[in-house]
Amino acid sequence: AQSVSQHNHHVILSEAASLELGCNYSYGGTVNLFWYVQYPGQHLQLLLKYFSGDPLVKGIKGFEAEFIKSKFSFNLRKPSVQWSDTAEYFCAVNAENQGGKLIFGQGTELSVKP
Amino acid sequence: KAGVTQTPRYLIKTRGQQVTLSCSPISGHRSVSWYQQTPGQGLQFLFEYFSETQRNKGNFPGRFSGRQFSNSRSEMNVSTLELGDSALYLCASSGTIPRETQYFGPGTRLLVL
């Protein structure tokens, strides 16, 4: 069965530190990849997405992610986090034969200390 | 454009009751998907509707059902509620092309006592 794995359950960083959140998926075919963010008390928002083309994609608020097909990975990065980045981050995969179904990772809670 | 709206936002029910949740997609979107979010299981796919037809279904018991109307609005129903059904139920909508980006609503928080 298809699955998505996020390596870190809870990450604590100080402001200005660099961030990298890992995401791996298990599916051998074509996928669309997403990172969503859920700020405290708010709904899921799209951070960035990859459908095809340049494997390095840029999203909102200075986030970027790199799709490495050979590693089945789609890691999220930000060079310098801010306190306002405190949130839960979800990686999601949509496989080619699954219509609109998204399979989510378990989520990574990011706490940024001011 | 207005975002995805869900009603009600909060709901308290007792075991054995049934509940209906409603979702209005972004204007022009024809696909609606439902997800259940719990602390233990995370975000799990329930089902997807497109043009009033169920296009995909997750691994939930038959107590969970849904439908979509001609205006793309969708409802989700859970019958014979169990304590474990307590969760945040999220609706997401996307456009007419399959596998487009999904945009999520604020969710309905259901508490089963």
Image: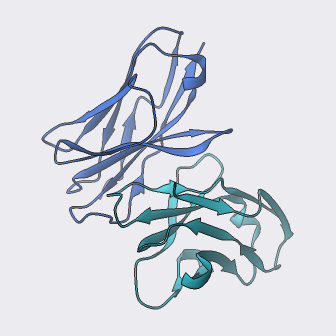
Is A114 situated left or right of A3 in this image?
Answer: right
Q: Colour of chain B?
A: blue
The answer to whether residue A37 is visible is: yes
The one nearer the camera, A113 or B70, is: B70
Q: Position of residue B70 (x, y in %)?
A: 12, 41
**Residue A64 position (above or below residue B38):** below
Q: Position of residue A82 (x, y in %)?
A: 75, 72
**Residue B105 position (above or below residue A10):** above
Q: Residue furthest left?
A: B70
Query: Which residue is drawn at the image coordinates 58% and 84% (left, top)?
Result: A70
The one nearer the camera, B56 or A47, is: B56
Q: Position of residue A2 (x, y in %)?
A: 52, 58
Q: Quadrant of the N terminus of chain B?
A: bottom left
Query: Which residue is drawn at the image coordinates 38% and 25% (left, top)?
Result: B62
Query: Which residue is drawn at the image coordinates 65% and 53% (left, top)?
Result: A106
Q: Find residue B82 and report its image quarter.
A: top right
